Image (cartoon, grey):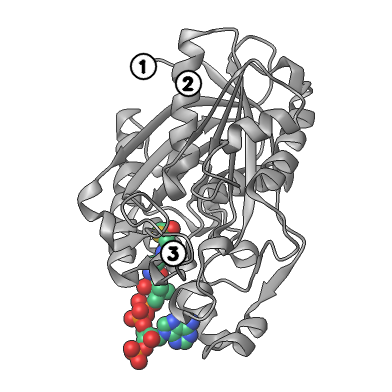
Amino acid sequence: MNTSCIIRGMGHCVPETRLTNADFERMVDTNNEWIITRTGIRERHVALKGETCVDLCLGASQKALENAGMAASELTHVLVATFSADSVIPSAACMLSHRLGIAGRMAMDLSAACSGFLYAMETARALIVLHPEAKILVACGDIVSSRVDYTDRSTCVLFGDGAGAVVMTADAPGLSGGRVQDVLVAADGAMGDLLTVKGGGSGTPYKLGETIRHDFFVEMNGREVYKHAVRAMSGVCQDIMTRHGLTRDDVDVFIPHQANLRIVEAVGKRLSMPEEKVFTNLQKYGNTSAASVPLALSEAVADGFIKPGNLVLLGTFGGGFTWGSALVRF
Ligand code: ACO
């Protein structure tokens, strides 16, 4: 599909409270050195003050709308990518629309774990082809801390909470923003059991009065996830470059899923991507699931890491498994 979509504005939002590696040293049998060496993460923001997925998505969306110079009333569609919506029903998208003061638009959640942003972008691109006048809010937020077992040292140090949002429309002369050149997304359910949050789903229901079990929280085979993440993310990033006849020299900035620094470095190495082109903020936020890439994109633009004219390569990998890549020209 030859797209002509543009990201008109973006924003991000994280909870106030931070958990540092020193805090984890007091909570579980771990230490700063182990966490830094294995993950690169120094701190993460967590919703200890009761912030919800919709609260963070609202914060990010308001900034994205302001950045786009648009009012919420102009939006035609609201998409939310999350695995940790405030409730099963109503959806986060319905709640977010209401909090933005709008009604009568399509509002839909979608779930692709850490690849949620690219899945939502691809959905928005298709909607824009159907409805060229569409002004679509794509908000991605996760309160991963609500599904993390803070007694399990092998998972709890990895994750943080956050949200990132973009406003997408059809491209037109005179508009400024990030022109979406292409999006590539994929999935393979065969490996789904390597990374799960099962408890509370209809396959693993809880009955009234039952105590929650380990399956309520993120469970994963870290080593296997690591291998697949590196392979799939580097593969899909290479594929999208090949599809457009590009090499790493054509890419100005690479923003991979902010899972952990070792994954990022291994993917960068496979793509022969110079380190100085790779943007990371996982040191401050940990792995924020669906929020990871839009939060990084928003920060990279705000910090001036991404400059006008830059070609940006995005890459994701998440539970499911799901993975994806995108090319955006700023
Ligand atoms: N502090 C100290 N020791 C720990 C900790 C901790 N927080 N967690 C685990 N360990 C111990 C283990 O118990 C193990 O001890 P043992 O040898 O006595 O059994 C030892 O450290 C090594 O454990 P491994 O799991 O082999 O450590 P590894 O080098 O594989 O690193 C990690 C673990 C960081 C989880 C790595 O496998 C990884 O990065 N996996 C990817 C997982 C990921 O990022 N998932 C996020 C979701 S998916 C996504 O977003 C891509």
Residue 103 x, y percent position in the rendering:
69, 19
- Residue receiving disc 3: 216
Looking at the image, tell me whether mark 2 or mark 3 is earlier in sequence order: 2
Q: Residue at x 47, y 60 (%)?
A: 208
Figure quadrant of the C terminus: top right
Tag 2 residue = 125
Q: Is residue 267 left or right of residue 46?
A: left
Residue 218, position as x, y percentages in the image: 43, 65
Q: Quadrant of residue 188?
A: top left
Q: CA distance from mark 3 to mark 1?
A: 40 Å
At horizontal 65% and vertical 15% (from top left) the residue drawn is 104
Q: Secondary structure at mark 3?
A: helix
The residue tagged with tag 2: helix, strand or loop? helix
Front-lying residue, 138 or 107? 107
Q: Is residue 15 above or below residue 4?
A: below
CA–CA distance between discs 2 and 3?
A: 34 Å
Is label 1 within 8 A of ligand 1 (CB to nearest ligand atom)?
no
**Counting other residues with Cα less than 10 Å from the Cα at mark 2, is it few (<14), some (14-19), or many (20 or more)?**
many
| Residue denoted by label 1 | 1
Confirm whether residue 313 shows in the render. Answer: no
Quarter of the image where one finds residue 282: bottom right
**Mark with earlier residue (3, 1):** 1
Q: Amino acid at mark 1?
A: Met
The quarter holding residue 241 reads top left
Amino acid type at mark 3: Phe
| 22 sits left or right of 239 in the view | right
Is the residue 266 above or below the residue 242 in the image?
below
In the image, what residue type sits under mark 2?
Arg
Q: Nearer the viewer, mark 2 or mark 3?
A: 3
Q: Are marks 1 and 2 in contact (CB under 8 Å)?
A: yes
